[in-house]
Amino acid sequence: MKSDTPSFELRGVGQARAGRTVLEDVSAAIPRHVMTVLSGPSGGGKTSLLRLLNRLDDPVRGDILYDDRPIAEYTVTELRRRIALVFQTPVMFPGTVSDNLAVAAELAGVQDGQFDELAREVMLLAELDPSLLERPGGELSVGQKQRVNLARALMTSPEVLLLDEPTSALDPETAGALMKTIGSLSENGQLTIIVATHRVAETEQYAHHALVLRDGRLVENRDSQATTENERNR
Amino acid sequence: MNGTAEMQRIDVLDQPILNLTWIDLTVAVGLVLIAIGISRWHRTGLARSFAVGAIRTVLQLTIIGYLLVYIFAIDQWYLVVGALLLMLVIASKAAVDRQDSKRAGLFGITGVALLVGSGLTLIYVSVMVVHVDPWYNPRYLIPLFGMILGNAMNAAALAADRLAGEMETRRDEIEAYLALGASSVRAAQEPVRRALRAALIPTLNSLMVVGIVSLPGMMTGQIIAGSDPLVAIRYQIVVMFTLASAVALAAVIVVLGFRRTFFTDAEQLRPKDG
């Protein structure tokens, strides 16, 4: 797939939850192999949009294309391995950090012989000390859990990484460090990253593209520098 | 079941069966009054329910007693099968009525679970173990099915209730599995495991303590009715094994069938009670 074709294309996407409209007529192209920041006030529809891209939900209206194909045409489990989603609140599976990575490795079909090397690699990518691999997940700090969730998502070697408010539960220093890690992931030029956040300033130096959602509507869709200036001035 | 050495023991127990009159039963009401009295004393709010329960016990058992007399007297296979099916429908409804979760399809899933779980084990035990003759002999089939069904019903209700609870409390974990590309089967593995454990542990416990802590109703009933205790324990052993099978089958069918209702065809977790 050429890098100038968008990763995702949204065409008139609408979504409702519990009878309430949460996204309305959203149309946008999300560029490939760069970081896109998805911002806007709480309840604006950021999480709902990310869930549609990973197909945890389906839209009530409109079409979503990934690599020029409607996402409903992909096998859903296959699609989710290619488009990984990291939730706002980190979720640890039972067992150690290694057990958590092993779940993703099993789903991605990683060979047993390759697991140790890959686990170490994703731990380093998520800027976690590989010595934590044998630590029970429940003993980690929230920041470490969020990084383990990031490492676990990377185990499936995704093409797209969706991050839902990854820093919202973290103090500013830890949040800044995590965003730096995410920024460095986008700089290798292989990964499409979409970060939903209300802390736009944290992402400005890494994001290439920006979308702003308010009350379920897309109110801005432009290059990130311009958008951050605009957001700041509000 | 008819070894001669064991049969001789019946002579030891060759005593007349003590029949209970309606007057005896009236005296027994005093025992329920104790429970009602304690409930009122501590204002548990259960006194009235105890009274209603006692009346229902008398009415229901009286009706079933006369019904059994009728079915035994007519001795026709279709009456026996009809009675078994009626028991099945009532048990399925009772299991579903105990659920907080009112998901569509639970009645059908429970019905299939109880039919397969109880039905298969009843056929196995009546044909292969007890050698019931004729095959529909109501004196054996109806009490056996009643015991099997009662236990399977409890297991099905426990399993469904626990599964619904686990699916709700573990929503985030289940979605985290799905988001990684896990199938719904993989994502719900832990809730399924816990629901099955919850359903199977009471039966496992009863296998562990039977004869030590508890003497089962059927066995005591047989002994009071004049059977040799060694015959009664053999029946009880068969019943215990039968219950283990019926409970496991009913629980696994309910859990696997019910699990499907929590997910869409696109492996998405449905909203609560959606």
Image (tube, coloured by chain):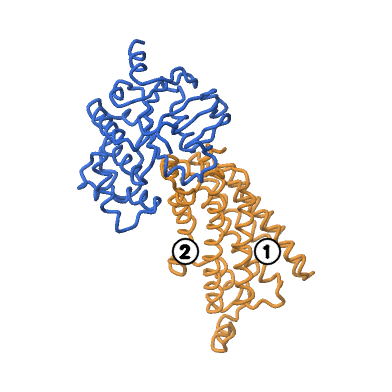
Chain colours: A blue, B orange
Q: Identify the image quadrant of the C terminus of chain B.
A: top right
The label shown at residue B220 is none
Residue extending farthest to the right is B74
Which mark's residue is nearer the viewer, 2 or 1? 2
Left or right? Give the position of A209 relative to A139: right
Q: Nearer the viewer, residue A7 or A201?
A: A7
Residue A167: image quadrant is top left
Q: Residues within 10 Å of mark 2 (few under 14, many from 20)?
A: some
- Residue under label 1: B21
Q: Position of residue B126 (x, y in %)?
A: 63, 73
At label 1, the amino acid type is Thr
Q: Nearer the viewer, residue B64 or A125?
A: A125
Q: Position of residue B86 (x, y in %)?
A: 71, 57
Q: Earlier in the sequence, mark 2 or mark 1?
A: 1
- Residue under label 2: B206
Residue A225: image quadrant is top left
Q: Residue at x 55, y 62 (%)?
A: B249
Q: Secondary structure at mark 1?
A: loop
Q: Identify the image quadrant of the N terminus of chain B.
A: bottom right
Residue B80: image quadrant is bottom right
Residue extending farthest to the top is A233
Q: Residue at x 46, y 34 (%)?
A: A51
Q: Position of residue B8 (x, y in %)?
A: 56, 87
Q: Secondary structure at mark 2?
A: helix
Q: Chain of mark 2?
A: B
Left or right? Give the position of B61 relative to A61: right
Q: Nearer the viewer, residue B208 or B47?
A: B208
At label 2, the amino acid type is Ser
Q: Position of residue A128 (x, y in %)?
A: 23, 41
Residue extending farthest to the bottom is B4
> Vertically, is A215 above or below A30?
above
> Vertically, is A69 above or below B2?
above
